[in-house]
Amino acid sequence: MVSQNKIVPAPGSRKASKRVGRGNGSGHGTYSGRGCKGQKARAGNNKVRPGFEGGQLPLIKRLPKKRGFKNIFRTEYATVSVGALNSFEAGTEVTVEKLVAAGLLKNPGKPVKILADGDVDRALTVKADKFSASARAKIEAAGGSAEEVGHAAAAG
């Protein structure tokens, strides 16, 4: 068993500290690794704050400020295009649950809005929280009906 006074660290695991200002023969004499004169050569806390550019107008002040605002009361809708409704049989009553089951709706927690992208060629009864005017016209032109229903998430 090795006695405690003979324990030494593994070779290479401990590194000697840099001894500066101990003569030019050491390689760290004269300026002690600080270079020539200047702010960072001085004694004491020679750090400058992040973003400080030596008195030049900093980048953060050169850029334009943020514009506008974010409406925290905005209602975000999950959207479904009219063209996607062709995956249902004619005469089907299309509800939010059926849209989720068909994979047309990613987030069932949001209220649903039907948009007029594409064309519908069959008569469907579509029940959603909101319709764009042109989407409603396309559904009714195909012989179907568009009914707005309330939604729990529509309020928030």
Image: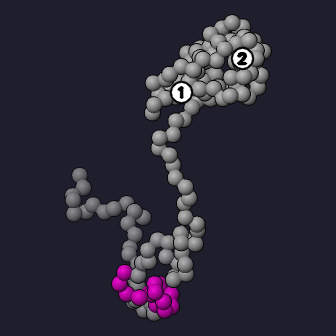
Q: Is residue 36 magenta?
A: yes
The residue carrying pointer 2 sits among few (fewer than 14), some (14 to 19) or many (20 or more) residues within 10 Å by Cα, namely some
> Which residue is outermost to the top?
91
What scheme was used to colour the molecule? Answer: one colour
Considering the numbered disc 1 on the image, is that residue within a helix, a strand or a loop?
loop
Q: Residue drawn at (72%, 7%), measured in percent from left and top?
A: 90
Q: Name the residue under label 2.
A: 140
x, y percent for residue 146: 64, 18
Asked if residue 34 lies left or right of residue 105, the reply is: left
Q: In this view, does 119 lie above or below 30?
A: above
Image-based side of 146 in relation to 61, left or right: right
Q: In the picture shown, does residue 55 fall above or below 12?
A: below
Residue 12 lies in quadrant: bottom left
Residue found at x 74% / y 12%: 143
Q: What stretch is highlighted in magenta?
A: 31-45
Name which residue type carries label 2.
Glu
Q: Is mark 2 on a helix, strand or loop?
A: helix
Q: Quadrant of residue 132?
A: top right
Query: In front here: 124 or 48?
Result: 124
Q: Which residue is drawn at 39% across and 62% down?
A: 13
- Return the x and y of residue 126 as percentages of the image width and height: 63, 16
Q: Are marks 2 and 1 in contact (CB under 8 Å)?
A: no
Q: Name the kind of residue labelled 1 in the image.
A: Pro
Spatial separation of the CA atoms under disc 2 and disc 1? 21 Å
